[in-house]
Each structure stands twice: as C-alpha cells, then as structure tokens.
Image (cartoon, grey):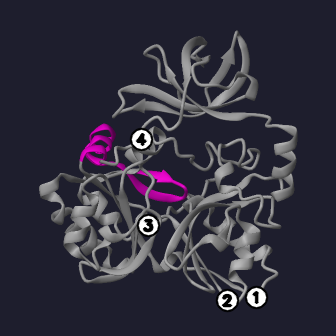
Amino acid sequence: MTTGTAIQLKRTALYAVHKAAGGRMVEFAGWEMPVEYSGIVAEHLAVRAAAGLFDVSHMGEIEVRGRESQALLQYVTSNDVSRLKDFQAQYTALIERQGSAVDDCVLHRFGEGHYLLCVNAANTEKDFAWIVRHNRFDAEVRDVSDLYSQLAIQGPRAASILARVTSPDPTSLAPYWFMRARCLGVEGLVARTGYTGEDGFEFYFPPEESERVWNCLLEAGKSEGIVPAGLGARNTLRLEAGYALYGHELDDSTTLLEANLGWISKLDKGEFLGREALLEEKREGLRKKLVGFEMLDRAIARDNYRVSVDGREVGRVTSGSPAPFLKKNIGLAYVPPEVAGAGREIEILIRGKRWRARQVPLPFYKRSKT
C-alpha cells in the first residue's frame, strides 16, 4: 500500500492573526489563505462603501537591477517600460512568443537601472525563471519575495485611513504611482494600486512587522468601517471591475489581444517577445474575444460552464459569480468575434439546461470619481 505525501502549504506572516480573527482558511496557489472572515458579501460591500484590508503577502516580488535592466524588461514584457518615470508603476504582462501571457503583473520603477515586479503567487517561480532565461542583457534578476509582506487597503475611505498613520501623506499620489514612506513607523513602499475597482493602496514592508501593521491599520480605520477581507471578496470585487485573473481569463492559449489587453501591448515600442505573433493576429483577426455578460434569469454562471448561441456551443465561461454590489449574476466568457457584441444574447449551459444571458459592456462596475 502506498501513502501520499501531504503538500506543505506556505503561510504568510499573518497566518496566526487570520486564524485568531476567525478567518476561514483555504488552499490558494500553494498558500493557506483566508477566503473570508465575516462573509464574502459583507466584505465585498464594505470595500465598496468604506474600506477593506487584505493580506496579499502571497504575491511574488522580482527585482531587476543593472545598466540594461530597462532593455531586459522591454524585451520580456508587453507594455512600454521606457514611458515610466521614477516612482511610477505600470500594469503589464510577461509575454510568450505566441502572444499569450506568462503572467500579468505590476512593474515599479525606482530609477534608472532599478525595477520591482509584483507577480501572481502561483507564477512566481515560473516568472523568475522566464526572465532569467531571456536575460541576455547586463542586468541582475532576484526573487525578493521573502523580503516583503504586502497589505492592500481598498475602498473610498482607504486614503483617509492611511493618511492618519503614514508619512509622507499618500493621498498626494496619483493612481499607479508609489513612494517610500513610513506607515505606523514602519519603512516600506506605498503604491496607489489595487485589484478591486476602488481607490486604494498597497503597502510593501518587512514581514516581521506584519502583525503590528495589520492590527494597527484595522484599529486606525475602525471608526470609518474598515473590515478584514479575504480572497473571496477580492475575487468578486475584481470580477465586478472586469479585471482579468490569471488561470481564468489569461493562460498560455489566449493572446493579450483576445483578452482585451491590447492597451498594454505596445507594438510600436520595438522588438519584444510576442510582438510578431500579435502583429500577425491584428492582420488576420482574433480567434476568440473576451466578453462580459449578465444573466437574464436567476441562474448563476460559474467558471468553465459552456456557452452556446442558437444551440451551438461556441465558448466557455472563464469567471462567473453573483455581483454583490450590482445585485446581478455576471460573468466573463470567450466567444467567437462574430457573436461578440454588447446587447447580443448568449446561453449558458447549467446542469443540462440552457439559461439566457445578455452581453454587456465592460467593466460591469465603475466607481464614481466624485
């Protein structure tokens, strides 16, 4: 008789805090992470109305330094690194030769010859190896994930909460800019970035300070309604905002153009991995297109459900869920370009029955800037 070896899940520095707070822990990308505390819907609505605090320390960080670090990053990512100014961040993708994403990530520029990539937890080792494999430049690549805890404070009250305990005042940052700052006396990086569709910030800092920073941020925002939030709400929030999730909307068989990410595919910046494939795709046309839809019935579309038009199977749902703030059942799906279009109906196959849905413009939710 053979016995399987249990896989040892990784834990962030806040594991004990999550358990003590009643967080329901699940396996995610090789990590044991909180999926919810007070409930996914309650946490989702708190982020839309006030603020939520997320532990995203499972995310990976890759540092690129050296005289030709910009040249290396221009070659392996899809966006135009040369447009970045010091302490500016950029949404981009590490790209395959066929035009698909190795991963989507956020690139931070400290200055000439010094960059930091924040990558998805499940892809950290793969991303690091990919960059190293293509490093024909005078640049040093290091996986520095162990040097950082990362917290995301998201929601309309995030700025006012963080301003009370951070110096310099982070409210001066524009979206996708970052700075060195002291939050609760702890040195780190504060970036005006996030994955919820709300205003918000991400704080990168030494892991040994994690418990104090987490607890003090919750205390600082208590009067403004901040709540601890888990991966469940993070997922429903990003879906309402129409954001892609690697392994769902992005994978090695889907190009950036098919995923509606042409805006981070700067084909005029010069040679980079995937450029020729994307240029050819622009000439020849897309094989499939990512669309948003809302259910016309009470049924809920879930990931990987099949999509049909006039009884003919044409695609699949990549992400589907109830949208707590919008009070609708929504989803993302890949369909052929000829059936894509806002207002057009599709059918979702759920337990052997076809349920009607209507394609709608993305994003489903867009926050008010007032």
Front tag of 2 and 3: 2
Which is nearer the N-term, disc 2 or disc 3?
3
> Are the residues at dot 1 and dot 2 in contact (C-beta closer than 8 Å)?
yes
Drawn side of residue 311 relative to residue 323, left or right: right
Q: Amino acid at mark 2?
A: Gly
Front tag of 4 and 2: 4
Front tag of 1 and 3: 1
Q: Residue at x 24, y 49 (%)?
A: 50
Q: Which residues are magenta?
A: 25-49
Mark 4 vs mark 2, CA separation in Å: 39 Å
Drawn side of residue 126 relative to residue 287, left or right: left
Mark 1 vs mark 2, CA separation in Å: 6 Å
* For residue 13, above or below residue 86: above
Q: Quadrant of residue 97?
A: bottom right
Q: Label 1, secondary structure: give it.
A: loop
Q: Residue at x 42, y 29 (%)?
A: 322
Which is nearer the N-term, disc 1 or disc 4?
1
Which is nearer the N-term, disc 4 or disc 2?
2
**Which residue matches tag 2?**
66
Drawn side of residue 221 relative to residue 283, left or right: left
Count neighbours of disc 1 (C-alpha within 10 A) and say few if under 14, some if 14 to 19, many if 20 or more: few
Q: Quadrant of residue 14?
A: bottom left
Q: Amino acid at mark 1?
A: Asp
Front tag of 1 and 4: 4
> Are the residues at dot 2 and dot 3 in contact (C-beta closer than 8 Å)?
no
Q: Amino acid at mark 3?
A: Ser
The x, y position of residue 204, in whole percent, is 41, 74
Which is nearer the N-term, disc 3 or disc 4?
3
Q: Which mark is residue 57?
A: 3
Count neighbours of disc 2 (C-alpha within 10 A) and say few if under 14, some if 14 to 19, many if 20 or more: some
**Which residue matches tag 4?**
366
